[in-house]
Image (tube, helix red, strand yellow):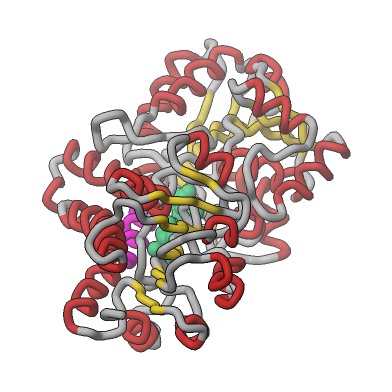
Amino acid sequence: MRMTVFGVGYLGATHAACMAELGHEVLGVDVDETKIERLRRGEVPFYEPGLPEILMQHVNSGRLRFTMDYGEAAEFADLHFIGVGTPQRKGEFAADTSYVKDVIARLSPLLSADAVVVGKSTVPVGTASSLQEIADSHAPDGVRVEVVWNPEFLREGFAVADTLTPDRIVIGLADGEGSQGFARVALEKAYAPILASNPCPVVVTDLATAELVKVAANAFLATKISFINAVSEVCEASGADVTVLADAIGMDPRIGRRFLNAGLGFGGGCLPKDIRAFMARAGELGADEAMAFLREVDSINMRRRERMVEVTVEACAGTLIGKSIAVLGAAFKPHSDDVRDSPALHVAGMLSLKGASAVVHDPQALGNARALFPTLAYADTALAACEGADVVLVATEWPEFIELDPLAVTEVARGRVLLDGRNCMPAERWRAAGWKYRALGRGAF
Ligand code: UGA
């Protein structure tokens, strides 16, 4: 099949390359010339394991191309995916849907035959039907554009696997599950290779449900993380161990152990903005009380970052002035170079503002971190960040930090205090090497 993908960031570039991997002919479209140039050369403009290989393979084979020309895209296919961003609006909780709207408003008048537009971006419920109105008013006479919603559940760091072997495929159609029209047939055909090799449930529903499935899933994940982090506060106050507790409650299959890792909490370009946009949209719909608990989910999450700073101050005998802190991690999670709303960088920034010299290292995110927080100090290796450090603070659970040799760190650091912001470090190994170990949710030193 031929298809286009509008917006080639983390979501769109992955989707485009994976669709080519499934055997389709794909044209990626974006307004960012630098991004398009790099993708045309087969370069992924961000870190995503496994993506460079399939991108290069399909750029070379010619099955995957990139353009900035909407006219070319309109001519190329009658199946168009949208994966542009829906960031949080400045000074508000609501999502900014202007990029999605722009794509529809620019593309629709250029279409010369009936087409399907498949939204993949995370949007407030009701967006798809307003996009349908834009398409109807902008498409040439006689051309029918059908807007459908097909939310994406991929995680950064596992984006290729999540796209090629999804847990489920959700398809929202204006006519609901009874529809047998062109849009449903086109999407089922597009995903047929996935369903043939790795069958997964396909949920066909109405537009509003499909839009809500995505935000509800992210809100649930955020709530699960904040739940364990709230319990973690009680563990700290009572001397209990949140990691043992999480293991024990996670053994109940109704609860499950995944997403119960206590620590610095969630960040990134999705969970924080999605819970806020969900609250904002619920409010617009008159259901604000229903989602009011998400405000608490958000504050528990932000409190963990402040608590990490407090614990660091305690470890430095009450003041950070003149202290050097090695901050290991800048990305919002391992296997990613994304620093959007990163708890690690947030903590490093707060430590620095309180007078410490925070030296940050991250295996992949140093470039993005430097661009966002140019005033922090950065080191090219974990050991270089630890040189002269009074405290070593692990803020992102990269495997190379977990595997660090405490004896090697002992040789370069000034102090012997390890603060574990992700409950990921082998505590006994560090204690055996003469280090004081402290983690969020696991009592005192
Ligand atoms: C999230 C969802 O997991 C995806 O399903 C969704 O498609 C994506 O958002 C999106 O909306 O695009 P992602 O932001 O890549 O994916 O990252 P997650 O793996 O969900 O982690 C989010 C944050 O939660 C990270 O900062 C991570 O460190 C934190 N986290 C995760 C915890 O603090 N504890 C946990 O137990 C798990």
Q: Residue at x 61, y 25 (%)?
A: 30
Q: Residue at x 49, y 60 (%)?
A: 388
* Residue 254 visible in image: no
Q: Quadrant of the C terminus?
A: bottom left
Q: What is the magenta range? A: 216-225
In the picture, measured across the screen, residue 440 lies left or right of residue 409, that is: left
In the picture, measured across the screen, residue 234 lies left or right of residue 7, that is: left
For residue 218: magenta? yes
Please tell me which residue lies in front, 269 or 115: 269
For residue 19: magenta? no
The image quarter containing residue 384 is: bottom right
Please tell me which residue lies in front, 132 or 360: 360
* Residue 251 visible in image: yes
Q: Residue at x 37, y 32 (%)?
A: 129
On the image, the x and y values in percent for residue 164 come to 66, 57
On the image, the x and y values in percent for residue 36 come to 68, 26
On the image, the x and y values in percent for residue 19 come to 70, 45
Query: Relative to 186, does residue 77 appear above or below in the rendering?
Result: above
On the image, the x and y values in percent for residue 17 come to 71, 43
Q: Quadrant of ligand 1?
A: bottom left
The overriding secondary structure of the stretch rendered in magenta is: helix
In the picture, measured across the screen, residue 82 lies left or right of residue 294, that is: right
Query: Relative to 338, does residue 63 appear above or below in the rendering?
Result: above
